[in-house]
Amino acid sequence: MGNFFTSLFSSSKNEDSAEGKAKNDQKNFDILKYDGIRAQKIGQVAYAIKCFTEALNIQEDFETMNYLVSAYSMANQTEKALETLNRMIEIEPDHVQTLLTRVSVLFMLDKDAEVIADCLRVIELEESNHLAWFLMAKAKRTTGDQLGAIADLTKAIALKDDFTDAYLLRAEVLLALKQGKEALPDIEKAISLAPEEETTYLVRGKIHESLGNLDAAADDYQQALDLNPFNEDACILKGTLLITKELLDEAIAFFDEAIEIRPDFAKAYAERGRAKNLKGDKEGAFEDLKKSIELNPEGEEAKKFEGQHANFENKTYMPF
């Protein structure tokens, strides 16, 4: 591929006139741009990035920059994607789609304050842009402004009354504020709009559990598992609910099955260990907890043992 670039640029050495150079530059730009597009389509992302970068060295083209952002994102080069987006917005500061693309990249970089600023800019340009209100709500939730998030989500829903993700997120925010009764209508609406979306049942299950409706919660967690048997959150939520209801044998059997399906499920070992501990099986609890930490040495269970390693090995300390 290096020979390609060498021959491409050396072909212009006999073009002495300004007009000839301009024509040759345009030809080279087009070759590089469309080679990059083809390379990106077949998954040769590194080569696509090289083509787009070389093309932009010849000509600063907004569309090519957009392709480069996409290629950088595919290659997990998020900072470089952001640099390119920043330049695009310098060129076209009122380009709504570019601002929203930068919002997505800023989320990946945990730059939520900058997300809010970009969303506000989009809203200045298009107040009816429901997506900008929704994304701003996501950022406000992350930064701790829960009431601001609810207000923004309410605006997003007013603009698009079938906005499933907005109903779902508002339900999650209300649940976090311990307003389960207020959250329930939102999650019911989300389920009516997307009955095959497993996340909606998980959230409704959590709401029911917060309100003490444990049987309804169990049904929702099972519904999520019926939709996706590999949903780890649903598995843990259902199993821990069985423990809460003191159905310890059922909980252990449930986690036995989960571990059989996925032998590296660290959290399932930990929760099975908790159920065994409550049944008085200290040895079994210790072995499960030990296995959980082996599988996930940086996980929640491992952190509970900081400073307690000797006691753990002597089986005198288990954080249940």
Image (tube, rainbow, N blue to C red):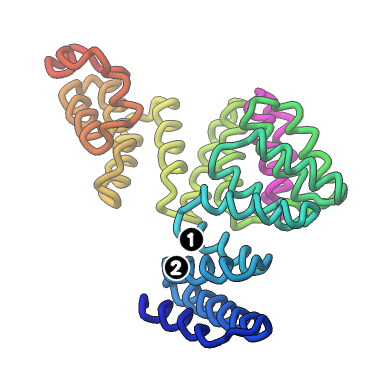
The verdict on residue 189 being magenta is yes
Q: Which residues are magenta?
A: 164-193
* Relative depth, front residue between 45 and 197: 45
From the image, tell me which residue sits under label 1.
74
Residue 96: numbered disc: none
**Residue at 64%, 84% in the rendered image:** 17
The verdict on residue 126 being magenta is no
**Residue at 54%, 41% in the rendered image:** 109
Question: From what the image shows, is residue 38 above or below residue 136?
Answer: below
How would you rate the neighbour count of disc 1 (Cα within 10 Å): few for under 14, some for 14-19, many for 20 or more? some
- Amino acid type at circle 2 is Val
Secondary structure category for the residue under label 1: helix
Residue 186 in view (yes/no) = yes
From the image, tell me which residue sits under label 2.
45
On the image, which quarter does residue 289 sit in? top left
The answer to which of marks 1 and 2 sits earlier in the sequence is 2
On the image, which quarter does residue 285 sit in? top left
* Relative depth, front residue between 91 and 237: 91
- Name the spot of residue 97 as percent of width and height, x first: 73, 58
